[in-house]
Image (spheres, grey):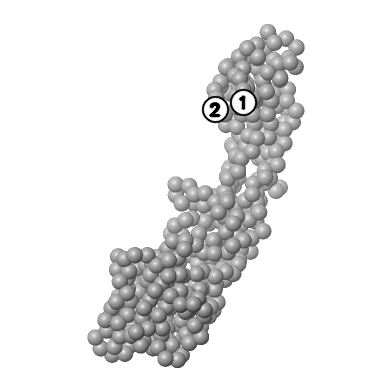
Amino acid sequence: MRKSILILSILALLLVCGCTHKEYDAPEGVNREMTLFGEEISIPVGSVGPITVEDLISSNPTISSLINQLMKEDSQGNMYAECEEEFFKQNAFELSYKIPDISQPYHWELEDQYASISSPASLLKMFGFKFPKQYLAVTLRNPLRASIKLNGLSRAEAGNYVKEIKFEDFLIPSGYSATTIAEFTIPDNIMDMIDAVQFKTITLDLPANVPGISREGDAAQFVLKYRHTSQMAVGSTFSFSSELPLNNLNLNIGKYKLRKGTLSFNLESSLPFDITIKSVKVMNEKSEVNPNIVVTPDITLPGGTLEKPSVTPVNVTIEATEGAIPDIKSIRIAFAIKSAEGAGTTPLNSNMGISFKSASATLRGGVTIFGHEK
């Protein structure tokens, strides 16, 4: 029972103080004074949270640096990585020197084009991330003031998975914007990254007088470009350990000589991984570990989903081993994360997190203690 005691006591303190932003600093609007009128009283605390999936993942400095560089969010909050690169370019004026008779239409046969998809998201595979939804788009910019036609074959490769698109008189209009000529959506059960895109037996039918109808400067380039987008999920090997700091709590409870208090709440998790709390360190005003407050580790919080979050009832006790519980300025929570079963097909979403529901504090001994107000 003591295993469910001090660990989430500190987590409850975290949520009571509304720590949801990156520095985990206690916000304004927190009323920390509730008075006890007897030997024991239960005080409702309310619903607070969440600690987000980004908060937890970003606590690991190695992963955080990659996440900050790569991650974006769509309108639904799904987290994804994106990269794009040009892999073929030809100036229309330079091409015109190769045309035998510029007064006639030209049937341009391109060499086979191959692009290795260099998505930096693939680096996250080393940390156990998966890519359940991938999309690859290839665009071609037409620098002429006239439409052209494309014929040939394009293919995308993701490990052993191959998907092909055949072009037959594909019309590419005139315009400054590039035209999407190929789109590949990889099935959800293909977990390999798209690693290559190829164009074979490609021909472009150009009108007569290419130099006369070409735009100038950078706009005079035929350009093939790909854009690769991948939603992010955690695979079966996803795991890491880290610490989550909670600073500037300023819980001035030492003057009340409180020796013991109990926090009761339901912990709701929509995270696609399990969290095991290894230790909680209560720090003093010198940012040193306070040896008089002992925390029992190894509490596991099961993962859930946005549609069906896991709910864990918890009763937590915080107790001073000597004297009274002092003022609490900051804490550090050491935890380990491991992927929940079946999480590899669930995209990470910024709305995922941990929330504390129906929380209350039971106090003993005639003291005044902190609470929470909106």
Looking at the image, which is closer to me, 312 or 58? 58
Q: Mark 1 = which residue?
A: 218
Q: Mark 2 = which residue?
A: 177
**Residue farthest along the left direction in this orientation:** 37
**Residue farthest along the front direction in this orientation:** 286
Residue 342: tell me if it is visible: no
Which mark is nearer the camera, 1 or 2?
1
Q: Amino acid at mark 1?
A: Asp
**Residue farthest along the top direction in this orientation:** 103
Point 47% across, 56% down: residue: 350
Q: Amino acid at mark 2?
A: Ser
Measured along the vertical axis of the image, is residue 374 above or below residue 93?
below
Measured along the vertical axis of the image, is residue 258 above or below residue 11?
below
Point 72% across, 9% down: residue: 101
Label 1 to label 2: alpha-carbon separation: 12 Å
The crowding category of the residue bearing disc 2, from other C-alpha atoms within 10 Å (few below 14, some 14 to 19, many at least 20), is few
Point 50% across, 59% down: residue: 54
As drawn, the label of residue 72 is none
Question: In the figure, is residue 302 to the left or right of 147?
Answer: left
Looking at the image, which is closer to me, 268 or 169? 268
Point 32% across, 88% down: residue: 364
Question: In the figure, is residue 226 to the left or right of 35?
Answer: right
Looking at the image, which is closer to me, 187 or 56? 56
On the image, the x and y values in percent for residue 162 come to 68, 42
Q: Are marks 1 and 2 in contact (CB under 8 Å)?
A: no
Looking at the image, which is closer to me, 283 or 318? 283
On the image, the x and y values in percent for residue 72 come to 52, 49
Question: In the figure, is residue 277 to the left or right of 238?
Answer: left
Return the disc, 1 or 2, that comes first in the chain's sequence.
Answer: 2
Quadrant of the image for the C terminus? bottom left
